[in-house]
Image (cartoon, coloured by chain):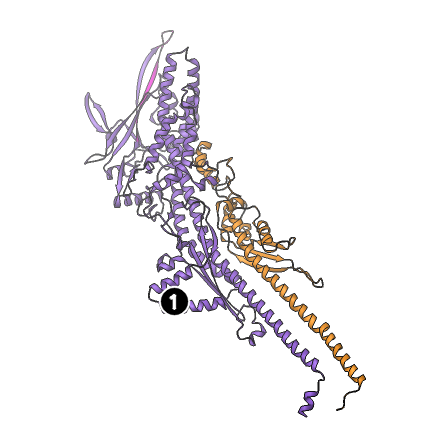
Chain colours: A purple, B orange
Amino acid sequence: MIRRLHKDESAQVSFLALAASLVLVGLMAMIINTSDVVRHRIHNQEVADVTALAAATWSARGLNTIAMLNVLNAKLLSMTVIVNAANRTMPVTRKILALSTAAATACTPFCTPWLFLLEGQAILLEPLAAGLQAMEQSVTRNCSGVAWKVMKGLQKASDAVGQTFGRIGYLEAPAIAARNGASSAFAVDGSMLEGSLTEVGKLPVSTTDRTPADFCAAMKSGGPGFVMQGYTDGEGPAEHGRGIWSDLDPISVLNPAFATLGSPWIFDGFYSSEMTRLGCDGSTPDKEGQKVEFSTLPQCREHDVTATWALYEDETDWLVDGSLDEYDFIAWVPRDVDLEGGGDAIETAAAAAGVDVDDVPPVTHTPTGVGARELMRQQRKRTMPASCAGRGRTGYPIVEHTVAGDLFFLSLRDHPEFTHFEVGETGFHEGASTDRSEATGTYFLRVNKTEREVALEGGSTRTEYKYRLDSWVLVDAGEKTLEGDELKEYYEEQAEREGVTDDGPVSSGEGCGTFPVPHLLVEEPEDKLRFFAVVNHGLGESGQPPKPFWSNYFSVSPTTFTSFSQAQVYNDLSTDMFTQDWRVRLERVTLLERALERAGELGLGSIASTASSVITTVNNH
Amino acid sequence: MRTAPKSLQNRQAGSAALESLMLLVFLIIPLWGLIFTMGYLGIRVQQTHEALSLSTYTFLLEREAGTDNPASSAQGTVSGSVFPGETSPLQVHVNDTEANAVADQMPEGELQTLQKLMGSVSGRSNIAVSVTREDPIGDFDTNPIRRAMVIGGATGTYCQMQDESLNPFAAGDVGGAAMALIGIAGMGSDYILAPFGGLSGGEAKCD
């Protein structure tokens, strides 16, 4: 039987074909399986890559945002330097113009063309000076200007970005991985290697030990970040602004622009002074103390400083009308408010004086009352210090007072001939008391009326009147370098008075009077800017593709995949934090190796060895 | 020993030959053909993955550099690297759905650019790559192989934001805020504005 079966060759081909077919089917299954495994592994690696990039992207985004805010603050700071320097140039320019006009008048008619030019300059000068003064007061003045508040806000925004963006990246990374079908994923930055958990998720920028002088290089010399924005290479925004003034012809005194816009070298002097305040001349700014300009007499008294008052003495020509009173000589005009306690509405008064109210800064000596139009050109202005230091020193000037031929000296506030006015939020207040703020702009007014009889043709006479106006104005309430608690209390009071919630200083440990400082990179942030991502895929798990059916037969066929990736945040142009060009790229996984080395250093050798072998197995699977 | 008749022997040999021929024609050749085709498609699929990965990365770099059409640029780069010698086998599509959705919800006006910036910052991009499935035999459909990947939003480089009209220093936006600042002071002088930014006529520094 056996022998016969051995000899029976029938259907041998069919058996061979069957065996070959099985082999072929097996081969085909292996090819499909291998292809599938490779496809899942490639996909998993792709997801790991974008996960690491997503985490790194938020840090790059944060650094770019901070660079943008640093640039913006550098520009705002440059604007304050330019505007303040220009504003300080104006009084000098005005004097130059007055002297030039006097000289031109003296040599007229030979100098008539020059005089004509100078008169043209005078027409241009006043609105420009008024505009600059208004801008200094409302925009660029320390602490109270809009630019200051914006800079303060930008610095706080930078703080917030530095604290949050990296952490958002930590959340974003697994979310991106999940959207790409991963079972689980996470990403960490290199600060984990140092074991500093408090630094995890924070951007490696800081204002610690920074000074306003850290803005100087950017303001003066710019950098790649400014070049991208169209600035000339080597020229920052402050230098650019200075250049505009320097482009004016400094040689020709006849150039109308010369006197109107101020001599470039005069401007340069004030520009340098402003830059010095920032410490841009190489000096180290006083970080502890901050020079503060006070604006009210109570502050002047509290800090024992010296206020400055200005006395204006004006008079009218001989007038026929003798009915004017002191309200008609109101000289300092708040906008859009009516006079309180008598007098005409401000608009009416201004219209009568032929002055546009909107053009008049609040504390400029520009008479606009009904009687003020009769005032002659300002005759004299002089300033007088008034000490607030010591007992009984109230910050008011001491003024002569004559009673029945006897000469006395009285505090201006006690002088019976002067009426005390204060410009408040709702208008003028007569008889201001010390419980009011007595802010700069507060003034005292005295009107002397003189009569004379003038003979007319026909033998009749008429009475003519001349009014002399003496007005004292509080120009400033003194200044002082404050430190520590004194400085802090000052800004708290300032914030309370302005109704502003001020929960902290502009920069670390300092008040709003301190110039902003930039957020710059901390030293050696390389590892901090590396992001390591781990991504897992588990076939057959919830939300995952099903396990292939042959995985039941090929037990060696993997159904779980783990991939690693590392991304780095970098800036090839410049890491000066004024260059908004932080990008991300993938790089070789070094953090993993370093983490294992670090574990060995910490005596976790066995764990590190096990982890290493597991990772190697997973990677080679 | 008896043997089969000659005619029977001939018939059996013919059957075996015919059977072998039929196995060859109807089983072995199609099976090997299928294996080769699947292998080819597997390679093509892996090439697609590779193209997706490379496109994603190239797209990121191009977008950060402010390239006008980063998807198109990435397509050109990757197509030449992964599919040399083939004519337009790769298409790269990018859909910034969420970023656009955020921006579209914002009202028209001065702040729209800033809102677009925020939209871009918080948004994501869906990169879809489709690769033409070239049929070596000619009997299969040539539907493209598609793979997609969701990536994070923009890094916010200066050039990237400039390219996408998201430049906060542009005249209409924070520059506009500067104008507002100047307006508060009743001034509109270019001399004052110039150092603040918004410089005109600057040479384009971005790609």
Report crowding for label 1: few under 14, some 14 to 19, many 20 or more residues within 10 A (C-alpha): some
Q: Magenta stretch containing residue B103, yes or no?
A: no
Residue drawn 65% across and 66% down?
A: B36
Q: Residue A322 placed where, x, y %?
A: 35, 20
Q: Residue A499 placed where, x, y %?
A: 35, 45
Q: Quadrant of residue A236?
A: top left
Question: Is residue A257 visible to us here?
Answer: yes
Task: Give the number of callouts.
Answer: 1
Question: Secondary structure under badge 1?
Answer: helix
The residue sitting at the front extreme is B1
Question: Is residue A146 visible to us here?
Answer: no
Closer-to-camera residue (A230/A472): A230
As displayed, is residue B96 above or below residue A136? below
Closer-to-camera residue (A83/A485): A83
Q: Magenta stretch containing residue A464, yes or no?
A: yes
Q: Residue A275 placed where, x, y %?
A: 35, 35
As displayed, is residue A606 above or below residue A488? below
Residue drawn 55% across and 65% down?
A: A40
What secondary structure predominates along the stretch shown in magenta?
strand
The residue sitting at the bottom extreme is A1
**Span shown in magenta:** A455-474
The residue sitting at the right extreme is B7
| Chain at numbered mark 1 | A
Closer-to-camera residue (B100/A19): A19
Return the residue at label 1.
Answer: A608
Instruction: Look at the image and tell me in which quarter the N terminus of chain A lies.
Output: bottom right
Q: Residue A312 placed where, x, y %?
A: 31, 24
Q: Amino acid at mark 1?
A: Ala
